[in-house]
Amino acid sequence: AQSVAQPEDQVNVAEGNPLTVKCTYSVSGNPYLFWYVQYPNRGLQFLLKYITGDNLVKGSYGFEAEFNKSQTSFHLKKPSALVSDSALYFCAVRSGQTGANNLFFGTGTRLTVIP
Amino acid sequence: DGGITQSPKYLFRKEGQNVTLSCEQNLNHDAMYWYRQDPGQGLRLIYYSQIVNDFQKGDIAEGYSVSREKKESFPLTVTSAQKNPTAFYLCASSLRQLTEQYFGPGTRLTVT
């Protein structure tokens, strides 16, 4: 069975400090991993993805994520948080196996950056 | 949200009425998807379509129907059989099945 866990419903961080939003996954075969951000009453915006290659993936707005196969994790990071980063963040995974169709989402982590 | 439009942004209906949510994309994407978002539950897949005139049920298809007559359009009908239709509905598309999905701005449906 495929699943995604975002263990923290809420993350608070001071502006200028580094931030981490955690994600662990379970999937058959090689994982395709994604991070999305959602602002209030809006659709999701794609931030970054890991398909293969370098374990450190860089994405939009200064975000990056590190793929760790042994820990089945794909944590989202940013060196210096901005107040405008406050939003709801979703991790998602799908199997790279042929015939795998669905993208599975975590329940989301609400990030609040405190001025 | 660019390239994918959903209308209307807010929709109100009485219980027992069918309602159709619009989704259009001009990205020339092959695959399109409908998700439902409820507080604290993340996104759940309702239906998806990999190609025109073909679609498959997702995890929570009961009470919903779709059509894919044109590549750029994937309307979702919420029928009176859907027991708890009040939710935020998100449409998405992707170039191919395994590439990243791009989302529309969503439609918030309230049924009373």
Image (spheres, coloured by chain):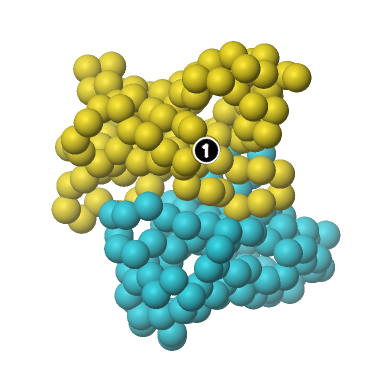
Q: Residues within 10 Å of mark 1 (few under 14, many from 20)?
A: few
Is residue B49 left or right of B107 when viewed as pictured? left
Q: Residue at x 35, y 41 (%)?
A: A49
Subunit under mark 1: A
Please give the name of the residue rendered at 72% of the width and 70% of the height, measured from the top-left corner. B8
At 37% from the left edge and 34% from the top edge, which residue is drawn? A58
Question: Where is mark 1, residue-wise?
Answer: A61
Task: Provide residue B30's location: percent of width, then percent of height.
Answer: 35, 71
Drawing shade for chain A: yellow
Position of B34 compared to A24: left or right?
right
Q: Is residue A112 left or right of residue B76?
A: right
Judge whether A96 appears above or below B71 on screen: above
Residue A73 visible in the snapshot: yes
Question: In this view of the protein, can residue A106 be seen by the observer?
Answer: no
Tell me what hue chain B is rendered in. cyan
Give the quarter of the figure containing the N terminus of chain A. Answer: top left
The amino acid type of the residue labelled 1 equals: Tyr
The vertical placement of A97 against B80, above or below, is: above
Q: Which of the 4 image quarters holds residue B58?
A: bottom left
Residue A46: percent from the left, percent from the top? 47, 47
The foreground one among B52 and A43 is A43
Look at 45% across and 26% down and name the residue there: A76
